[in-house]
Image (cartoon, rainbow, N blue to C red):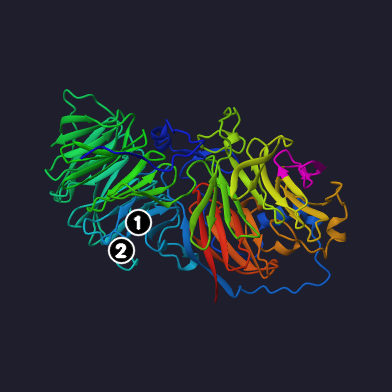
Amino acid sequence: MEKQDNTINEGKGSLEIDDDYEWECSGKKIDKFGNVVDRYEKKEIILELDNQDTENEKSWRCNKPFAGEIVGPTVEKVNKSLPDKGLQMEYVFGYRASDTRNNVFYLPDNNKIVFMTAAVAIILDKTTNTQQILGGGEKSALKGHDDDIISLAMDSKKEILATGQVGKTPYICIWSLKDGSLLKKLYQEKDSRAVRSISISNSGQYLVSAGDDNSHTLFLFDLNSGKLLSKAPGGTDPILDIEFCPSDETLFATVGKRGAAFWRINSGKLSCNKGIFGSHKMADMYCAEWLSNGNCITGSINGCVYVWKGSQCIKTVKLHEGWVSSISAIPGGVVTGGKDSYVVVLTEDFKEIKRVKVSANPKAIDQDGEGNIIVGLRDGSIVEITKDSKCNTLMTSHSDGEAWGLAICPNTGLILTTGDDNKILAYDPSTNKCVRSGIINEKAGPKPKSLGASTLSKFPPNQSARALAINPKNGNVAMGINTGELSVRKSIEQLDQEIVHIHDAKEWIEAIQYSPCGKYLAVGSHDNCIYIYDESYKLKAKCNKHSSFITSVDWSLDSAYIQATCGAYEILFFDAMSGKQLSDGAESLRDEKWATWTSRIGWSVQGIYPSGVDGSHINGVDRSHSHELIATGDDWRLLNLMRYPCLKGGKGYAYVGHSEHVVRVKFDNKDEYLYSIGGYDKTMIKWRIIDL
């Protein structure tokens, strides 16, 4: 067959990630404040949205500057009961590929695939683009995961799915792929930190998982009973992949730094033979598979596939420039993916049939047995290469650092997101498809010595953005970049057409809001200032009375005033035309109608804090257009829904779906849906608002 070379979604401004392996193995990340922390460090989930004040909370409330700046309206009805509305997860926009692999599979009818992101697994129907979501939901009734899912495996019959998460005592959820029900949970030992890799034996008798503790312990479970049979140290380096031999229930391979290892199960115990390279060059390994003849194949850092007979390497085949990051093998065919962004299709004896160029490094590959190939890519997308070499994109999402930017077009209803990966993405909520994309900056700037807003993104600050707003008058899209620059794009339809570029702010921009009339734009920076621009984007006023970085900006309904909050928990009021602070604003504007409410401080949101916490734990805030509901996202991975206004003693519901701090929440234009975006999980979730 003649070789073919096709290109899928090659985009501008892409960045090759050269040190993914070190990133996967580093064990570090950077929190929302720019501090380096352990990658598994998480705040414990608070059990109640509201309770009696603790001494810590009383101290926080009494000593914060906003305490004297809260004045209630002249007349306001308050209902402290649970809201009569709830949330139901309907669609998840995300795919975790930055530090995971081997996590996208076909289901038996081939019209469905399964993958994971954040704290949920997803069954996607390719024909209808609808999802069945495994896990998530209201926290008090949660049955699935409550933290990052970082591993996924299926049995050979494709009837059950195993998903593994991080945590102090990590566990594995076993799901039925027939009806999506949770069958059981398997627990690794305390302090094993994560279920790094999983594999299920061919008959479904055994499940093996790898921890991320210092010994990278292997755990052997009897899958039927759920009993932990035995454990064994896996070595000094993380285990990146585990694969059972299809023809031998008692044999499996593991790969990582310095090669491969082959394990035997004997009377419920584990024994190991390290792979012997012999005359072949020793190399780090990334992935493993088994051929129908019983030989194992592994993908290496040097672009070669290594062939193993027993524990002896008998052959190497050069297929890629850079590492081989994924392999799929079925009788008669092998498919590999590499750092060079090629998917290579071969016969089982490694004769090349074709190679297809994709937009990024393939981290997961599966075949349906009919010539179609599903590929999970490092850039957060999932594509299908059909047997006639047509290429279809099934998922588009953010892929690096954090995703914070979230805006909804007041005219079209399109959803816009951006993050630390040089992407601007626009989704159509009627089809749940990414319909437009743009880039933040074509040319990469320098990486700063200090972190600023940047997380572990490999993109520099000038290619990262965390704030978005859409002009209700003309559709302009304003974007706050992590350098402090302001970039205005002509429209969602023309995301790469920049009409204005301004660099007034000295630090990164967290808050942006257009005025309701569309004539003005307020930009809140981490340099403690708010910059107000007129409709020609000339600087009209500057508000410089805050003592810390700006976290939210809201306009009055008549576009005359601004209320803003900062990192020092001040809520200040300004005349928008002059930038002058209104020192009596809390009193004089007590009955003012605010076009939006994104502030986590104020009379109407006093009850949004769980007991015993300070104000830093609440991130995104949004009020419904009906003024009946208030939603918040917090550091405990929760999306919270309460009545508006929410005073002390107000009750609400908490929802799980995200696996990292929820940084932005947004009601759609008709209050039919609520959207949330998780910073470090880089995932947007669409929640339907339902009657209870």
- Is residue 258 shown above or below 492? above
Query: On the picture, is 57 further left or further right than 294?
Result: right
Q: Is residue 544 visible?
A: no
Q: Per the image, is 530 magenta?
A: yes
- 137 or 64: nearer the eye? 137
How far is the residue under mark 2 from the one under mark 1? 9 Å
Q: At which x and y percent is residue 488?
A: 67, 43
Determine crowd level at label 1: few under 14, some 14-19, many 20+ residues with C-alpha closer than 10 A. many
Please give the residue where the numbered disc 1 appears in the rendered image. Answer: 114
Element carrying mark 2: loop
Query: On the picture, is 169 further left or further right than 140?
Result: left
Q: At which x and y percent is residue 325?
A: 32, 38
Dividing the image into 4 quarters, which one contains the C terminus? Answer: bottom right
Q: Are marks 2 and 1 in contact (CB under 8 Å)?
A: yes
Residue extending farthest to the front is 2
Please give the residue where the numbered disc 2 appears in the rendered image. Answer: 177
- 215 or 24: nearer the eye? 24
Element carrying mark 1: strand
> What is the span of residues highlighted in magenta in the rendered image?
524-548
Query: On the picture, is 481 further left or further right than 433?
Result: right
- Please tell me which residue is depicted at 21% across the width and 59% down the height of the picture: 157
Residue extending farthest to the left is 293
Query: On the picture, is 347 further left or further right than 303?
Result: left
